[in-house]
Image (cartoon, rainbow, N blue to C red):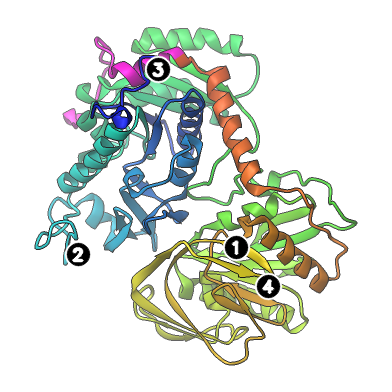
Amino acid sequence: MSGIRGKGGTDGSGARGGGLLVAGTTSDAGKSVVTAGICRWLARKGVSVAPFKAQNMSLNSFVTREGAEIGRAQAMQAAAARVEPSALMNPVLLKPGSDRSSQVVLLGKPVGELSARGYFGRSGPAANPPSDADSPGRTRSLGREALLGTVTECLEELRRTHDAVICEGAGSPAEINLRRTDIVNMGLARAAGLPVVVVGDIDRGGVFASFFGTTALLSAADQRHVAAYLVNKFRGDVSLLEPGLDMLRDLTGRPTVGVLPFAHGLGIDEEDGLRVSLRGTVRESVVAPPYGADVLRIAVAAVPLMSNFTDVDALAAEPGVVVRFVDRPEELADADLVVLPGTRGTVRALEWLRERGLADAIARRAAEGRPVLGVCGGFQVLGERIEDEIESKAGTVAGLGLLPVRVRFAAEKTLARPVGEALGERVEGYEIHHGVAELLDGAEEPFLDGCRVGSVWGTHWHGSLESDGFRRAFLRRVAAAAGRAFVPAPDTRFGELREEQLDRLGDLIEEHADTDALLRLIEKGVPEGLPFVPPGAPGGTS
């Protein structure tokens, strides 16, 4: 450990810290979890460490204190590293708006909307890019070379100020159709001289073939950076796996530096998917017994392009609270609270609610005085009218009419970290939205930046339910409106639960990985003499 301490710029020498890239054989192999676990393990050892993901595709994002938007996974990895999240940690964020296009967020700010072909196939400058505030008269390019330059500069800045930077790849490094434009996997590894550990999910099956095939599909130059493998989600006796690991080393010349056991509920804030990170998949979660006499049932509408669904994590962490995602009106029948979450497509979500019959079911609930909460895009659909020439370009669209609010979409995105008070409690949150809400007459009570009418609440604030006192006060109001004898537990501390979760990830690395081997890679870089595994990339793809 002494070799890595003081290596970064934190000692005032300006020296360059060590680095490691965590890649995966597939999406959801466990890269985010492993990266967070390594960060927490190093931080507990006194190492100044930072996470990094060059390019992230996610609708689950976060706002840093300087007002930059980054992926929530990187914000949680920063928490694991015990450092403040920064735009440097996720310089490129892609927020899908459809199957074929995404908003591009560069260094924390949106710079335009591009098709997948336009982004991944582009080699020239973006059309009408915004001015670079740091260099008047210059423009940012969305070409591969310019983006690679931007991400490597951010990585180098982190390495100058930290002893170690743990980078996360995206998808698989063997996506040979995208290698030419890659800036997050082997493209980054080669540009920054990083050793790569490839994570494989053995629970899916075929992990040996995945490790071998991933390596064998890379060019010789890329393979030189693949230093080791790490098995994730193993069930059973590790001794039965060891002969296969030995054969894999004989075939590839690369060791396996850990076998992490399968464990439920070990995720951090997810990039995509329907998951409550503190308890694993919602439909498989085990609810703690209620503190009072009743449980509280919460239904979250699984709207298209759902964003920041981690808002309900804090609800799911409460003993006696059952959270589930729903897409049919009959699933609202026994719900004590319906949550309309954020979405990257407010108008599309509104259409989906109407097509599914959920809009009528929600309106009936409101008329009966049964609780509904809308957050960000969910708040917007509850209003009277939406004027959108930005996101959907649908013009003026009627909302559900349950709150006296008119929403106009602005070209500039609101990115903020507000602090306020509601229900007599202090609240912290963050805002990420283009829609600007105008509150009209008829609101019975202000609610953060939104309002309440009857049992319907709406706000743009994400993360507000992580404020423990406010969450308990809100749940008491919901229980009273729903007629439930539910009592929030007085000692649930969401921040402490999150810290415990991150410590569990650090424990996984410390107890089940070859930490000496990981330290050597971080400190010394790419090992020499790693053999080539044929056949290599088709046509010699670089």
Q: Is residue 311 left or right of residue 129?
A: right
Question: Of marks 3 and 4, which one's residue comes earlier in the chain?
Answer: 4
- Disc 2 to disc 4, C-alpha distance: 39 Å
Mark 3 or mark 1: whose residue is earlier in sequence: 1
Q: Is residue 453 left or right of residue 14?
A: right
Question: Which comes before the other along the chain, label 2 or label 4?
Answer: 2
Is 431 part of what is drawn in magenta? Answer: no
Q: Secondary structure at mark 2?
A: loop
Q: Which kind of residue does numbered mark 2 sit on?
A: Pro
Which is more foreground, mark 1 or mark 2? 1
- Kind of residue at disc 3: Leu
- Write the residue at 19% across / 46% down: 144
Nearer to us of marks 2 and 4 is: 2
Q: Quarter-wise, where is residue 139 in the image?
A: bottom left
Q: Nearer the viewer, mark 3 or mark 1?
A: 1
Distance in Å between CA atoms under marks 3 and 4: 50 Å
Provide the residue designation for mark 1: 427
Q: Position of residue 420 (x, y in %)?
A: 56, 67
Q: How many marks?
A: 4
Q: Which residue is mark 4?
A: 372
| 128 or 360: nearer the viewer | 128
Which mark is in front, 1 or 4? Answer: 1
Badge 3: few (under 14), some or many (20 or more) residues near its Cα, within 10 Å? some
Q: Residues within 10 Å of mark 1 (few under 14, many from 20)?
A: many
Q: Which residue shows up at 45% across the image and 54% down it?
A: 62
Compute the Cα span from label 1 to label 2: 34 Å
The mark that comes first in sequence, 1 or 2, is 2
User: Mark 2 = which residue?
Assistant: 130
Residues at marks 2 and 3, CA–CA distance in whole angstroms: 41 Å
Residue bearing mark 3: 519
